Image (cartoon, rainbow, N blue to C red):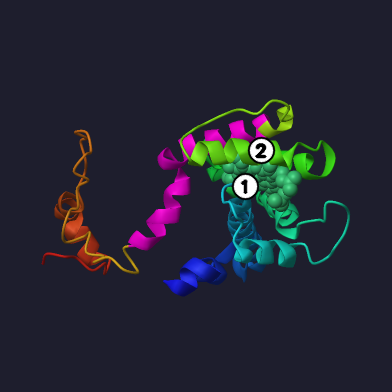
Amino acid sequence: MALEVFLFRSLFRNLRTEMNKGRVTYGSDMVLWLAGLVFHISFFIVLIRHLRFFLEPVPAMINMIDALDGFVQVGVPHLLLTGVLLVAAGGFLFYRRINNSQVRHISLPADYFPLLLIIGIALSGIIMRYFVKVDIVSVKALTLGLVSLSPRVPAGIGVIFYIHLFLISTLLVYFPFSKLMHMGGVFLSPTRNLANNNREVRHVNPWNYDVKVHTYAAYEDEFREKMKEAGIPVEKE
Ligand code: HEM
């Protein structure tokens, strides 16, 4: 699980399927693995760094991460690498979705939307930090007001901050209903740490509405003889 969560082990082992001169060939897809990893790790570090807006005094650990992330010491305020990497990796993942015909074929609005939203959040943050500066002291007064349940809106914070905040709020509202729940779902993987017995036992979500389903048991009853003929293992003889 640790390798899966921290290094995306299954994505590392994932193969790319392609047609080459009329034959199906398989190759590794390290670029996807690397872009996925950079995207997630950058996102995580950006979030941790943002704690400086919500905590007073700012813990030394956060200042250290900030200093490490800005080690290239370019520009004023200094360039934070993970913010830029987040946009770059997100941009690549989006480009891959529209450029690769197989991936485009299986992509839904629910795949494009969160990607564009996260890129939008990071871009508005970058614009705010390096180009259209806002008053960070007022931003901190606003965020501390929110976390101490005594909200106030200091005057004079630029509109770009509210764009950033609106996109983040949209992400938070959208999160629990979206594929982003893979963040928790990875810890409930049937093939890793659950019983993985869904052919023997039908696990029904207790809050499902009544849906007409074709259970595996019914499917096997219907096709048992044909499955046996084809050498496919069956649950009941
Ligand atoms: C999904 C959550 C968020 C993401 C992905 C995100 C992303 C970013 C990025 C990439 C930057 C550019 C600078 C950097 O690399 O840190 C940035 C800057 C900034 N973000 Fe966020 N952000 C998030 C949440 C928030 C929240 C909740 C607030 C405050 C309410 C906030 C306030 C700011 C401010 C004030 C800046 C400018 C920083 C500066 O001038 O140093 N962000 N954000």
- Residue in the image at 72% along x and 31% along y: 160
Residue 103: tell me if it is visible: yes
Query: Would you place residue 213 above or below residue 12 in this image?
Result: above
Mark 2 lies within 8 Å of ligand 1 (Cβ measured): yes
Which region of the structure is painted magenta? 162-189
- Residue in the image at 22% along x and 35% along y: 211
Residue 23: tell me if it is visible: no
Secondary element type, mark 1: helix
- The reply to whether discs 2 and 1 touch (Cβ–Cβ < 8 Å) is yes
Q: Which residue is mark 1?
A: 53
Mark seen at residue 139: 2
Mark 1 lies within 8 Å of ligand 1 (Cβ measured): yes
Query: Would you place residue 49 above or below residue 208 in this image?
Result: below
User: Looking at the image, is mark 2 or mark 1 earlier in the sequence?
Assistant: 1
Give coordinates of residue 94: x percent, y percent.
66, 46
Hey, what amino acid is under mark 2? Val
- Outermost residue toward the left in this view: 237
Q: Quadrant of residue 157?
A: top right
- Outermost residue toward the bottom in this view: 3
Marks 2 and 1, how far apart in space? 8 Å
Give coordinates of residue 136: x percent, y percent.
72, 41
Mark seen at residue 223: none
Answer with the quadrant where ligand 1 appears in the image.
Answer: top right
Query: Would you place residue 236 above or below residue 166 in this image?
Result: below
- Residue in the image at 14% along x and 54% along y: 221
